[in-house]
Image (spheres, rainbow, N blue to C red):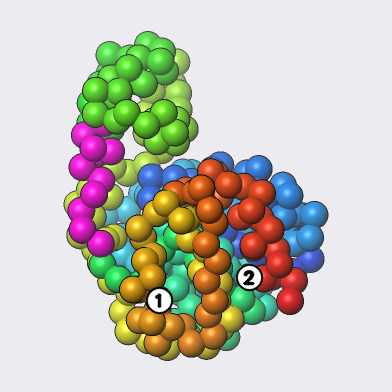
Amino acid sequence: MKLHYRELGEGKPLMILHGLFGFSDNWQSHAKKLAEYYRVILVDLRNHGHSDWSDDFSYEIMASDVYELCQDLDLEDLILVGHSMGGKAAMQFAQKHEELLDKLVIVDMGIKSYPMHHQHILAGIHAVDLPSIKARRQAEEQMSSHIESEGIKQFLLKNLYWKEKGKLAWRMNTRVLEEKMPEILGALPEGEVLTPTLFIRGALSNYIEDIDIPTIEEQFPDSEFETIENAGHWVHAESPGDFLDALLSFCVR
């Protein structure tokens, strides 16, 4: 699949893969800063953002999409950054196409499988009655019965757009994402990656726990870990300064 992407800056390529229910817009502010040093490529993964929808959805397929984009843009010596679901897609890409990578940065995502924990998010999305909505604030009100966090609500509402006058639609393919949730939450396949890799985790998140580190190091032997204090799963949004410092200090070595 030909993925939608945007480019900022010039120089060594740095590609960013967003997380579940996200899209490239979530990384715009970081991309502007990183574009002072790199050619930044912001990607919308399939079934997200401005990229096409498909019933086919897996990490192997996402990695294949990213490889196709790399071929189209003639990318090599790439720094690949992925958050959450995008992090696992980046790790799958590294297992298959390590020759294209210089460095890998995984943001708050491990290699293990995770229990289902998106029920309230899906319930909030389903609570939004798109045909009846005349203003975006109505969507927020409907979502609030299931989702308390203002941050998560605003994150999800970025996916709403006016498909035509008076008609809102989602940019994400919720049906397929919900159907494929067991696979999205599944473990990374076994496979050693020798690319230098930085795992950035939030101290308030449980996606990468101390007990997980030895297992990760078995598959990523040239890896290091950076913990951002006072940040949860959305490390880059909750502590942007510390996140960028960690990312850049690793990338410039």
Q: Which residues are magenta?
A: 114-124
Residue 126 image offset from top left, x and y in percent: 23, 31
Residue type at mark 1 is: Ile
Locate the N terminus by quadrant.
bottom left
Mark earlier in primary sequence (1, 2): 2
Q: Residues within 10 Å of mark 1 (few under 14, many from 20)?
A: some
Number of the label disc, if any, that sits on residue 213: 1
Residue at x-position 32% and y-position 84%: 190
Whether residue 117 appears in magenta in the rendering, the answer is yes
| Crowding at mark 2 (Cα within 10 Å: few <14, some 14-19, many 20+) | many
Q: Residue at x 54, y 44 (%)?
A: 237
Label 1 – label 2 distance at C-alpha: 22 Å
Image quadrant of residue 134? top left
Q: Which quadrant is home to the C terminus?
A: bottom right
Q: How many marks?
A: 2
Q: Position of residue 162 (x, y in %)?
A: 45, 23
Q: Secondary structure at mark 2?
A: strand
